[in-house]
Image (tube, rainbow, N blue to C red):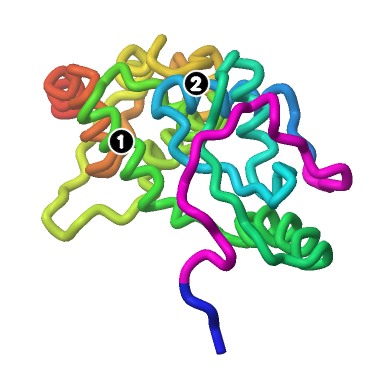
């Protein structure tokens, strides 16, 4: 019979970071870059994902979050204490918690639309808080520029000139110097190319859609 709820779990509690101990044989590694990304996430969103610990304050899930919390100087973090798990179950769950997340995929069409929607809502939002780095974000926006995506039936692609898109995006991504090659056009190109409704949303959020549309119609 499947047990409902969190097995052997007490209520959410605050626990001093100094008391939390990493599992001695945790096989998951965390680079300095990833810890920095977790720190940035905590600063923006707060510590919203509780750490899972056992009866002896050993971490079962959340090693990276605790390391980031220490780096940020947090005195305590929210934890959920799991009781009644065997050592074998703890070891298995530590692996499963990380491995199962890796097996998920991305609907890249919806992902690009969501990134554009974020910029539409908050034009200066730091998209690297999503966990994607500058190069990955450029590639995703380049996919939009190349017409990749699933615009709704009411959307109509528009023609724009590459130079206008370069001008629009310059300085708005973490690493804009790679933009011309990643978006698939050169600085000297004068031929218009077609972009999806998602790119129009990004353009609108950056305050340049009217000039781009005018350029595409010229």
Q: Position of residue 55 (x, y in %)?
A: 70, 51
Point out the tag, 1 or 2, that comes first from the N-terminus: 1
Residue located 70% across and 30% down the image: 19
- Residue 29 in which image quadrant: top right
Residue located 76% across and 36% down the image: 21
Marks 1/2: CA–CA distance: 19 Å
What is the span of residues highlighted in magenta in the rendered image? Answer: 5-28
In the displayed structure, 61 sits above or below 91; it is above
> Badge 2: how crowded within 10 Å, few (<14), some, or many (20+)?
some
Residue situated in front as seen by the camera: 177 or 11? 11
Main secondary structure found in the magenta portion: loop
Q: Mark 2 — residue?
A: 180
What secondary structure is found at the residue carrying circle 1? helix
Left or right: 68 as drawn, with respect to 47: right
Residue situated in front as seen by the camera: 160 or 201? 201
Outermost bottom residue: 1
The label shown at residue 93 is none
What secondary structure is found at the residue carrying circle 2? helix
The label shown at residue 116 is 1
Q: Which circle, 1 or 2, is nearer the viewer?
A: 1
If the image is split into quadrants, where does the N terminus sit? bottom right
- Residue 121 in which image quadrant: top left
Residue situated in front as seen by the camera: 42 or 52? 52
Residue located 28% across and 28% down the image: 119
Residue situated in front as seen by the camera: 56 or 73? 56
Q: Are marks 1 and 2 in contact (CB under 8 Å)?
A: no
Q: Is residue 25 magenta?
A: yes
Q: Position of residue 82 (x, y in %)?
A: 62, 57
Residue located 57% across and 67% down the image: 7
- Residue 22 in which image quadrant: top right
In the displayed structure, 73 sits above or below 11; it is above
């Amino acid at each position: 019979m499947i047990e409902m709820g969190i097995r052997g779990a007490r209520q959410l509690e605050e626990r001093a970071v100094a008391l939390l101990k990493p599992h001695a044989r945790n096989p998951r590694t965390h680079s300095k870059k990833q810890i920095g990304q977790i720190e940035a996430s905590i600063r923006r969103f707060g510590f919203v994902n509780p750490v899972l610990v056992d009866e002896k304050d050993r971490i079962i899930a959340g090693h990276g979050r605790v390391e980031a919390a220490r780096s940020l100087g947090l005195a305590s973090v929210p934890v959920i204490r799991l009781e009644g798990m065997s050592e074998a179950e703890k070891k298995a769950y530590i692996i499963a918690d990380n491995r199962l997340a890796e097996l998920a995929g991305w609907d890249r069409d919806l992902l690009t639309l969501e990134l554009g929607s974020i910029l539409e809502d908050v034009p200066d939002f730091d998209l690297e808080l999503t966990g994607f780095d500058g190069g990955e974000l450029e590639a995703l926006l380049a996919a939009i520029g190349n017409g990749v995506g699933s615009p709704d039936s009411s959307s109509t692609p528009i023609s724009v000139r590459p130079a206008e898109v370069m001008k629009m995006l310059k300085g708005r991504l973490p690493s804009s110097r790679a933009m011309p090659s990643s978006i698939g056009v050169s600085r000297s190109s004068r031929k218009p190319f077609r972009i999806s409704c998602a790119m129009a949303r990004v353009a609108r959020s950056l305050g340049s859609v009217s000039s781009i549309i005018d350029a595409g119609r010229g």
